[in-house]
Amino acid sequence: MVGMVGSRRRGSCAALRSPRAVPARALITGWAVSRLREALRAGSRSVRRLMSQEEGNAIVEFIGWSAVLVVPVLYLVVTLAQLQATTFAVASAADAASRVLEVDDSPSAMDNAQLAMQLSLSDQGIDADLSGSLSVTCAHGCARGQAAMVEVSVGVDLPGFASLGIGRDVVVVATERSITLPGKEEP
C-alpha cells in the first residue's frame, strides 16, 4: 500500500517494486493522513448514528416547549379576560351609582347608590370589598344642582395571586362619571 501511494505521486512503476523508493517523510505523512481519514470517517459515522437515534425525544420536546410557551400565554389570556371583565363591571357599577345620585335627593341617596353599585358588581360576578369602593367628590360643596364626580374603584382578582397571599391591591380598576346633583341650584 505504501508503494501505491508513492507510485501515484511519482507516476513510476519502480516505486511499486521497492518500498525504499518512497522517502520516509512521505511514508509518515501518508500514514498520518490515512489515520486521520479513518478517524474522521469513524467520527462521522458515530455522529450520524447518534443523530438517527432520536426515538421518543419528540414527545419530551413537545411537552417541554408546551410548558415554556403555552402555559404563560394561557395565563396571560386568562389574566386579560379577568381584567376586562372587572373593567366592564366597574364601568357598569359607576353608571348605576351615578344614575341613582342624579335622581335621588333624599338623605339615603348615598346608601342607595352603594346598593346599586353592589348589585351591578354582583351581576357581573365581581365580589368586591364595598367599603371605600364608591366616592363622590364635589368641586364647590355638594349642594343641589352642583356638578359632582362619582368614582368606583375595585381591585382585580388575578389568577393564582390569592394562593401567593397577594390581594386585590395589585391591580385596581377605577372609573369616574360626572353628574349633576338633583334639585335646583340655590342662590
Image (spheres, rainbow, N blue to C red):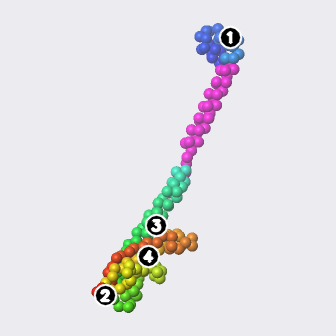
- Is residue 58 a member of the stretch shown in magenta? no
Which residue is label 4 attached to?
153
The quadrant of the rendering that contains the C terminus is bottom left
**Span colored in magenta:** 27-56
Select label 3 or label 4 by which is in front. Answer: 4
Q: Nearer the viewer, residue 44 or 143?
A: 143
Compared with residue 10, is residue 37 higher up or lower down, i.e. above or below?
below
Q: Is residue 77 left or right of residue 47?
A: left
Sequence order check, earlier mark of 2 and 3: 3
Labelled pair 2, 4 in contact (Cβ < 8 Å) = no
Which residue is label 3 attached to?
79
Select label 3 or label 1 by which is in front. Answer: 3
Badge 4: residue crowd in 10 Å (few <14, some 14–19, many ≥20)? many
Which residue is label 1 attached to?
21
Select label 2 or label 4 by which is in front. Answer: 2
Sequence order check, earlier mark of 2 and 1: 1
Q: CA distance from mark 2 to mark 1?
A: 127 Å
Amino acid on which the number 4 mark rests in the picture: Ser
Sequence order check, earlier mark of 3 and 1: 1
- At x 36%, y 79%, the residue is 148
Q: Nearer the viewer, residue 157 or 30?
A: 157
Q: CA distance from mark 2 to mark 3?
A: 48 Å
Sequence order check, earlier mark of 4 and 1: 1
- At x 53%, y 70%, the residue is 161
Which residue is label 2 attached to?
186
